[in-house]
Amino acid sequence: MSDSSRSTQRPTTTPGSIRLDPWLDHYAERTSGLSASEVRALFAVASRPEVVSLAGGMPYVSALPQEYLQQAANIATSSRRSEALQYGSGQGIPQFREQITEIMSLEGIHAHADDVVVTTGSQQAVDLMCRLFLDPGDVVIAEGPSYVGSIGIFRSYQAETVHVPLDDEGLQPEALRETIARLEAQGRHIKFLYTIPNFHNPAGVTLTMERRREVLDIAHKHNILVLEDNPYGLLWFDRVPPEAIRSLDGDGVVYLGSFSKIFAPGFRIGYALAPHAIREKLVLANESAILSPTTFGQIMISEYLSHNDWRGQIDTFRGVYRDRRDAMLKALDDFLPTLDKTRPNGGFYVWLSLPEGFNSKEMLPLAVRELVAYTPGTAFYADGSGQDKIRLSFCYPTPEEIRTGIERLSRVINRERDLLETFGPGRAHGEDQAHLVTTPPPNTN
């Protein structure tokens, strides 16, 4: 290759300019949709021991007995060692897929193991579905708010997320009808409806059975696929949620589940249950992306399911999270009694509404200075709305830490309320607060 031909392949810069990334002009157009998660961005600060983090949805894995893990690990590294350490099928181990169908049966789903695809967490299943269905400019309909991770995936495939509001009974069917009619009138391509029907992330609400049937009927009439993401469905507290949307329809719904919440997220194992034709393409896409899901992890969880009382362990998790939910609701009633909030019957989250004029994203640095962290509502909307909302996670801190965190948060909110009443909603936060975004809280140990 000549020197001149080599030079044409080098990244170029304008004379006198400074380019931090010399390959900026070489990236695919879709990389413009990649952005840092507001939840992940909090972890560096929120993980400091003096900060009470009500931000990340980290399961309380300490509630999983050590002997369960040790027994499963011993089998995976002894009698099933040659299988566990080897490549596997792009669809997943057959025995494990059979066990997954048993878990799904608890939510009214009657499925065959051949239609199950094991994935690297359920979030990878969302990514695979986007790979199969989304072209640039397509539309995904989702609740408003919706899961921040999935919104980021839709954006990375250059699709537009259009939100439909929800209330205490979940997604609003009439708003869904109106949204679909508007998009169809515009000639937009709606590829699927993405929904988290049980103990919604971030809103904590559950879609009623009446609305499940109505939403499914609307999807049928408009030939829209439903992507049902259900990582929290078995973690109910006071009453069993309605059966899965997938239990009502085997052809128009792709169901996603995960072991992150009922076992441990570190294994990164989820699954998709799909109609036959979609399942075949999911397997091909899975093999293209990762060759095969972790064999070691599948065997570990399979042995856990085979030899331990996993249903009893889910009951244990329910008790842990119920106590923490109760602690959070009690603290909010005590310290912030005038604010509206959801009262979840399961899952990990409470959705808090702030007074008019508040901006939860701008207020976050003040909360971190007060040694409490939360996730701003703006993280859960593709259009950046939700400024007056906060997601509070009760799954990881102890009940005592939760109460301390809510008390600290109340001080921040009450100070902000006083300032708003004095100066109005146009009050600027100023340079000092902007500085606080990147400054860790003081070490009080």
Image: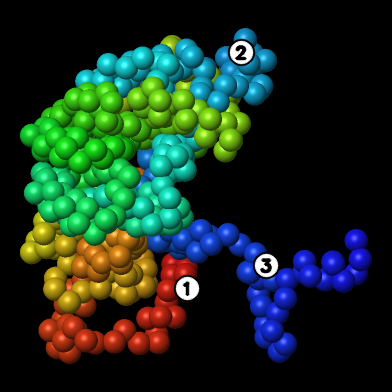
Name the residue beneath numbered marker 2. Answer: 80
Give the quadrant of residue 194. top left
Residue drawn at point x = 49 percent, y = 14 percent: 94
Label 2 crowd bin: few (<14), some (14–19), many (20+), radius 10 Å: some
Horizontal side, residue 294 vs residue 189: left or right? right
Q: Nearer the viewer, residue 440 or 362?
A: 362
Label 1 crowd bin: few (<14), some (14–19), many (20+), radius 10 Å: few
* Distance between mark 3 and mark 2 Cα atoms: 45 Å
* Distance between mark 1 and mark 3 Cα atoms: 27 Å
Observer-side mark, 2 or 1, equals: 2
Nearest to N terminus: mark 2 or mark 1: 2
Query: Amino acid type of disc 1?
Result: Thr
Residue closest to the far right? 2
**In the image, residue 9 above or below residue 220:** below
Q: Position of residue 128 (x, y in %)?
A: 46, 39
Observer-side mark, 1 or 3, equals: 3
Horizontal side, residue 214 vs residue 404: left or right? left
Q: Position of residue 420 (x, y in %)?
A: 17, 82
Residue drawn at point x = 15 percent, y = 29 percent: 242
Query: Amino acid type of disc 2?
Result: Arg
Name the residue beneath numbered marker 1. Answer: 438
Callout 2: SS: loop
